[in-house]
């Protein structure tokens, strides 16, 4: 009888609601006209294994990491990052993502992003450090390899504020990439 009542009690325990967060902006901008767009092949974004989980991993004040069971990314973190970068390059820098297009343009820029650090510290900061490269499909164009380290401070402990800080950091990373992509595509030199 005791076992049955414990089983019934366990089944009636209310399940905590999962919350999903995204790195994509709420408002999607219109892409550049195809005739003037810069064709870019954005490869899958690599992320550190420590944060490559559906659940959000945050750093605690004692420097330990905590996996939040109810707070999750809307998609795998690498996909979230790639989607946010593509969105920003498309809306702000005139790029068009050719990944998956049957017949991409003859001259395509390839973007690789390798995230080395993606830290979430509630009430303090969102940190994003990445190495990225731009290379052209045409011969004779030297690839550009850069490293970007960004910190977006926050003053409140809410995870929505932390997610917004990560969105700002990803937008800043995409803007650094976009400025150099636009220069290279115009035949100008670009440096990190």
Image (cartoon, helix red, strand yellow):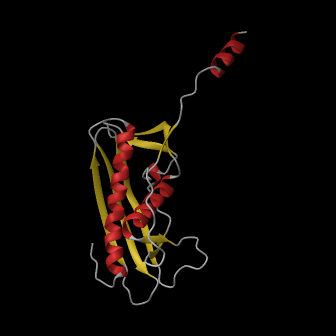
Does 5 sit above or below residue 170?
above
Q: Nearer the viewer, residue 91 or 151?
A: 91
Q: Nearer the viewer, residue 57 or 155?
A: 155
The x, y position of residue 4, in whole percent, is 72, 14
Quarter of the image with the C terminus is bottom left
From where the camera sits, is residue 61 visible? yes
State which quadrant residue 175 falls in.
bottom left
From where the camera sits, is residue 64 visible? no
Q: Nearer the viewer, residue 142 or 162?
A: 162
State which quadrant residue 135 falls in.
bottom left
Q: Is 92 left or right of 71, judged from the image as shown?
A: left
Residue appearing at x 52%, y 73% in the figure: 98
The x, y position of residue 61, in whole percent, is 31, 36
**Looking at the image, how many numbered discs can be counted on the residues?**
0
Does 122 sit above or below residue 147?
above
Does 48 sit above or below residue 132?
above
Does 190 sit above or below residue 165?
below
Quarter of the image with the N terminus is top right
């Amino acid at each position: 009888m005791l076992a049955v009542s414990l089983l019934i009690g366990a089944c009636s325990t209310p399940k905590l609601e999962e919350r999903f967060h995204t790195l994509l902006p709420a408002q999607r901008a219109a892409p550049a006209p195809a005739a003037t767009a810069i064709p870019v092949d954005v490869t899958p974004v690599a992320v550190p294994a420590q944060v490559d989980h559906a659940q959000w991993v945050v750093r605690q004040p004692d420097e330990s990491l905590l996996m939040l069971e109810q707070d999750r990314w809307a998609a795998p973190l690498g996909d979230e990052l790639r989607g946010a970068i593509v969105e920003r390059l498309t809306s702000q820098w005139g790029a068009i993502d050719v990944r998956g297009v049957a017949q991409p343009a003859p001259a395509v820029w390839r973007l690789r992003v390798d995230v080395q650090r993606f830290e979430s510290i509630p009430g303090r900061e969102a940190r994003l450090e990445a190495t990225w490269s731009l290379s052209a499909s045409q011969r004779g164009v030297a690839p550009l390899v850069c490293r970007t380290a960004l910190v977006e401070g926050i003053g409140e402990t809410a995870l929505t504020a932390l997610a917004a800080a990560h969105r700002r950091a990803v937008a800043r990373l995409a803007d650094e990439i976009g400025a150099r992509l636009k220069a290279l595509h115009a035949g100008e030199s670009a440096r990190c």
